[in-house]
Image: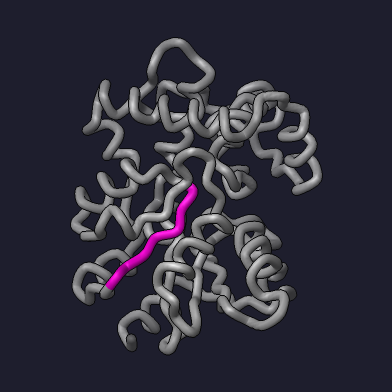
Amino acid sequence: MTNSMLIFDFDGVLLDSVREVAVTAYNTLNPAIATRLNQIPRAGLQSFLGNRFHVQPIGDAPVLMKWCLEIGESDPDKLLTPREYNEIIQQVDEPVAARTFRFFEMRNRFKTKDIEAWMALNAPVQPLWRIMIENPIENLVLLTNKNCEATITLSNHFGLKISDENVYSGDNGTTKIENMTQIMQRFRKPAYAFIDDSVKNLREIDEHFNQKEKAISLIFATWGYTGPDDARAARDFGYQVASIDEFAKSMLAM
């Protein structure tokens, strides 16, 4: 990793945003804008928080929330299998790009209504966030499904400085493969490393960029939004599997 350009996912890896995502997903399904967790039915919220790790494009979060609200009271502890989750997503006719746009639009409405409540639902992942503030990375690059404006706002609010041009985001439905291509074309580094808490994201990057030769080293963040079998799956695919303490230590050594 020390000889590679390190690229970071944001949600789950650097920022714990699961509570904000839950409220925003809930708001896409309701005319009134909730701003706090206690405004979401408890069982539905519990189900969503437990199954959040399945969500890859954020436009799928409202679909998951809808299912959780419907099933929550009867089985709030149910953990969806990947097959069950995919079946739920595939039943939706609305394109994922449209759902993603609607999610980001609702996030902006939430922020406009009560930005302090919105901020309070987010928290930096420690000690990693503190280490990155105290040891700034030159050309820190984020590769995220989050929208750029929210990413910049939260980074600045919690003291992590990053230039707008270095946030490769999910705006306009842009995928991580498309954004990674842009990163590689821009920086022209001999090697890259990417850390994400989604095995699905890592797998897509791996299959697209590492077919002929290994261009990107892949790191699975065990502290993010992960499922019970994700670490094992990441190891089976040959990815580095890192705990928060291991990764924080490696950051200090850079």
Of 242 and 218, nearer the camera is 218
In this view, the residue in front, 98 or 15, is: 98
Q: Of 118 and 137, which appears nearest the observer?
A: 137
Residue 132 lies, in percent from the top left, at: 27, 70
State left or right for residue 73 relative to residue 195. Answer: right
Q: Residue 86, percent across and down?
A: 75, 41
Q: Residue at x 49, y 26 (%)?
A: 102
Left or right: 17 with respect to 26? left
How was the colour assigned to the protein in this rendering? one colour
Q: How many marks?
A: 0
For residue 116, side relative to residue 227 (left or right): left
Q: Compared to 197, does 39 lie above or below?
A: above
Position above or below: 75 against 218: above
Query: In the rendered view, does 81 fall on the left or right side of 147?
Result: right
Residue 103: x and y in percent read: 48, 30
Tell me if I can see residue 85 in this picture. Answer: yes
- Say which residue appears at 45% left-offset and 37% top-offset: 21
Specify start and end residues of the magenta stretch as a single range: 139-145
Query: What quarter of the picture does the C terminus occupy?
Result: bottom left
* Residue 143 covered by magenta stretch: yes
